[in-house]
C-alpha cells in the first residue's frame, strides 16, 4: 500500500489531504488548519508536526507540497520566504518522499533557490494541472477564503504561461484578491445603494466577507476560522452590527430586511467581479465563453449565482474525480475547500 499526501501551505491556512491506495484509491483525510504565519512561523512548524504525528506517515508515503505563504510580510521577499518554508519542511518531517510543486511540475527538494519563482505561489497551477487530465476544456474558478483564481484550460493544457507571477496574473484577471472569508467589505465597492440612494462606504475594517456569507447562510463554520474584525462573536446579531457599520449605522438604525437586502447586493457585486475577470481571461486567451466552468474552493457555493448570471454550464471540481477515487460523503466539501492539497495528493496516481 502506498499513500500520498498533498500540502498547500498558505499564509493564513494550511490545507492537507491524505490518499491511500489499498485495493482501491480512497481519500482518507482532508483538513484545513489555521496558520497565521505573519504572526509566527511556529504555527507552520506545529501544524506540520501535528500532521506527521496523527497521520501516521511511513517511509513510502509521497508528500507533495505547494506554497503561497512565501509572500507573507514576515519575510523580506519571496526568495527568503521560499527558502525558509522549504527549510522548515525539511527540518520537520522525518520520513516520506518530499517533492515541491513548481509551475514546471513536481521537483525534488534539492531544487536550487534560483528557481524560487517557479515555486512561489504555484498552488493555482497544481490544482489546474490535475484537473486538466480529466476535464480537457474548461475554466477553473477556485474561490477561496482570500483569493479567487481563474485558470483557462484548452485541449488538456493550462494556457497560463509557466512563467506567470502574481503580478502578471493580477493584470490578466487570473488572480483576484477576493475571497469568501478574509476580504474587507469596504474594499469591494466605494458606494452601495441604500434606501434608494447611493451611499458612500466607510473604508474601515468593520466587516469582512465572512460576515457577508454568514448572513446569507452560505459559509460553513468549519471554514470560518479567523476572528471577526471587531473581535466580537460570530452570532447573527453581532454580524448584522458589523454590516450596518460600513454605511455608518448601528443595528438599531436598520431593519433586518434592509440588512438582508444590503447583503444580497454586496454578494451580487462579489459575483459580478469574478465574472468581470473571467471575461478578461476569455479575451486574453481568445477562448469560447461557452466552455464549461469548473468551480471549487470554500466559496463553491457561489456556483449557482455564477451559472445564473452567465447562463453557462458549471461543474463542481470534486464531482469530476468521483470515478477515480472513493471520496466519503462527509469529505466532499473538504476536497473542494482543499482542492490544491487534493490535487497534489492525487497527482501521484494520475
Image (tube, rainbow, N blue to C red):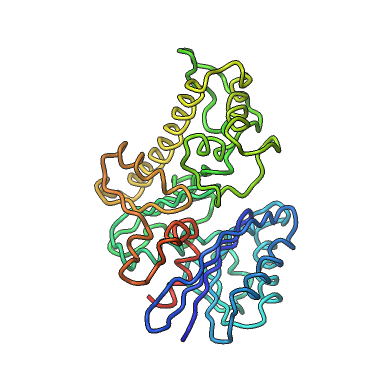
Residue furthest to the top: 196
Q: Is residue 282 above or below residue 6?
A: above
Residue drawn at 48 percent across, 56 percent down? 337
In the depicted view, which residue is nearer to us: 263 or 284?
263
Q: How many marks?
A: 0
Q: Position of residue 195 (x, y in %)?
A: 48, 13
Residue drawn at 46 percent across, 66 percent down? 342
Q: Is residue 275 above or below residue 241?
A: below
Residue drawn at 62 percent across, 24 percent down? 245
Residue drawn at 52 percent across, 55 percent down? 165
Q: Is residue 79 above or below residue 257?
A: below
- 221 to the left or right of 315: right
- 323 to the left or right of 220: left
Q: Position of residue 206 (x, y in %)?
A: 65, 31
- 195 to the left or right of 235: left
In the depicted view, which residue is nearer to us: 305 or 68?
305
Q: Position of residue 291 (x, y in %)?
A: 26, 51
Q: Is residue 320 above or below residue 111?
A: above
Q: Position of residue 210 (x, y in %)?
A: 56, 40
Amino acid at each position: 500500500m502506498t499513500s500520498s499526501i498533498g500540502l498547500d501551505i498558505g499564509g493564513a491556512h494550511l490545507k492537507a489531504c491524505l490518499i491511500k491506495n489499498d485495493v482501491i484509491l480512497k481519500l482518507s483525510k482532508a483538513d484545513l488548519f489555521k496558520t497565521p504565519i505573519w504572526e509566527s512561523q511556529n504555527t507552520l512548524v506545529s501544524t506540520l508536526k501535528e500532521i506527521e504525528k496523527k497521520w501516521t506517515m511511513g517511509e513510502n508515503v509521497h508528500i507533495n507540497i505547494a506554497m503561497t505563504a512565501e509572500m507573507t510580510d514576515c519575510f523580506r521577499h519571496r526568495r527568503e520566504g521560499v527558502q525558509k518554508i522549504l527549510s522548515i519542511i525539511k527540518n520537520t518531517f522525518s520520513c516520506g518522499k518530499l517533492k515541491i510543486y513548481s509551475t514546471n511540475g513536481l521537483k525534488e527538494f534539492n531544487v536550487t533557490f534560483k528557481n524560487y519563482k517557479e515555486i512561489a505561489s504555484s498552488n493555482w497551477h497544481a490544482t489546474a494541472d490535475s484537473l486538466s487530465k480529466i476535464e480537457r476544456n474548461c475554466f477553473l474558478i477556485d474561490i477561496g477564503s482570500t483569493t479567487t483564481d481563474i485558470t483557462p484550460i484548452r485541449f488538456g493544457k493550462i494556457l497560463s504561461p509557466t512563467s506567470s507571477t502574481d503580478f502578471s496574473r493580477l493584470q490578466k484577471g487570473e488572480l483576484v484578491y477576493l475571497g469568501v472569508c478574509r476580504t474587507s467589505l469596504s474594499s469591494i465597492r466605494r458606494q452601495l445603494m441604500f434606501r434608494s440612494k447611493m451611499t458612500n462606504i466607510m473604508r474601515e475594517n468593520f466587516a469582512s466577507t465572512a460576515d457577508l456569507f454568514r448572513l446569507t447562510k452560505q459559509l460553513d463554520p468549519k471554514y470560518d476560522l479567523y476572528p471577526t474584525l471587531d473581535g466580537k462573536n460570530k452570532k447573527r446579531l453581532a454580524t448584522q452590527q458589523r454590516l450596518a457599520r460600513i454605511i455608518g449605522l448601528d443595528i438599531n438604525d436598520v431593519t433586518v430586511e434592509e440588512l438582508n437586502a444590503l447583503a444580497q447586493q454586496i454578494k451580487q457585486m462579489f459575483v459580478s467581479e469574478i465574472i468581470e475577470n473571467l471575461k478578461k481571461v476569455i479575451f486574453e486567451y481568445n477562448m469560447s465563453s461557452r466552455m464549461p466552468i469548473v468551480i471549487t474552493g470554500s466559496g463553491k457555493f457561489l456556483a449557482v449565482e455564477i451559472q445564473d448570471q452567465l447562463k453557462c454550464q458549471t461543474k463542481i471540481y470534486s464531482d469530476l474525480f468521483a470515478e477515480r477515487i472513493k471520496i466519503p460523503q462527509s469529505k466532499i466539501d473538504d476536497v473542494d475547500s482543499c482542492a490544491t492539497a487534493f490535487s497534489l495528493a492525487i497527482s501521484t496516481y494520475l
